[in-house]
């Protein structure tokens, strides 16, 4: 779980742009769960293709919102403790373009 974004144009992410990508802080050694408890983060090895979901946590009740898919994980940059993802809007636009040629 992370609520902190990392600026894509400030990290060494080859061929990535803020228009099509985003990065989130993903500290392996300082990960916390929804309740703020320290946990062991999942190993990011093989992260390509994983869903990146947005879930809001009500700070008063701890209730979770309905998750929404916002990106597809494509790489982990250890030197920045960041996971880079392609914005889901880019994926859906590409899918529509590909489907137009399927007829």
Image: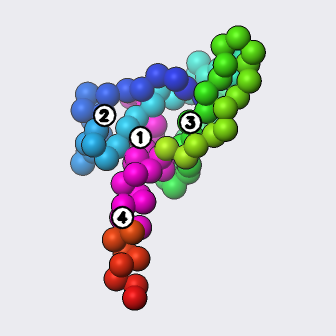
SS label for mark 3: strand
The residue carrying pointer 4 sits among few (fewer than 14), some (14 to 19) or many (20 or more) residues within 10 Å by Cα, namely few
Counting residues from the start of the chain, the first of labels 4 and 3 encountered is 3
Q: Are marks 3 and 1 in contact (CB under 8 Å)?
A: no
Looking at the rendered image, the quarter that the N terminus falls into is top right
Q: Can residue 31 be found in the magenta stretch?
A: no
Q: Please report contact status of discs 4 and 3: CB closer than 8 Å, yes or no.
A: no
Query: Could you tell me which secondary element the residue under label 4 belongs to?
Result: helix
Identify which residue is drawn at 46% across, 37% down: 83
Q: Label 4 vs label 3: CA separation?
A: 21 Å
Of the residues tagged 2 and 4, which is closer to the observer? 4
Q: Residues within 10 Å of mark 2 (few under 14, many from 20)?
A: many
User: Which is nearer the N-term, disc 1 or disc 4?
Assistant: 1
Other residues around mark 3 within 10 Å, as few (<14) / some (14–19) / many (≥20): some
What residue is shown with label 3?
A: 54
Q: Are marks 1 and 2 in contact (CB under 8 Å)?
A: yes
Q: Which residue does the numbered mark 2 point to in the structure image? A: 8
Where does the image place residue 101, in percent across and percent down from the top left? 34, 82
Going by the picture, which residue comes out furthest to the bottom? 103
* Span of residues in magenta: 71-95
Q: Say the numbered circle drawn on residue 94.
A: 4
Identify the mark nearer the N-term, 1 or 2: 2
Q: CA distance from mark 2 to mark 4?
A: 21 Å
Label 1, label 2: how many angstroms apart (C-alpha)?
Answer: 8 Å
| In this rendering, position of residue 9 left or right of residue 57 | left
Dot 2: element: helix
- Answer left or right for 63 relative to 71: right
Of the residues tagged 3 and 2, which is closer to the observer? 3
């Amino acid at each position: 779980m992370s609520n902190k974004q990392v600026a894509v144009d400030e990290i060494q992410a080859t061929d990535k742009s803020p228009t099509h990508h985003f990065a989130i802080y993903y500290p392996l050694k300082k990960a916390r769960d929804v309740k703020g408890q320290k946990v062991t983060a999942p190993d990011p090895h093989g992260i390509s293709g994983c869903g990146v979901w947005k879930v809001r946590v009500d700070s008063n009740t701890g209730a979770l919102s309905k998750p929404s898919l916002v990106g597809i994980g494509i790489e982990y940059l250890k030197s920045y403790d960041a996971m880079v993802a392609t914005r889901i809007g880019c994926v859906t636009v590409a899918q529509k373009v590909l489907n137009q040629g399927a007829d």
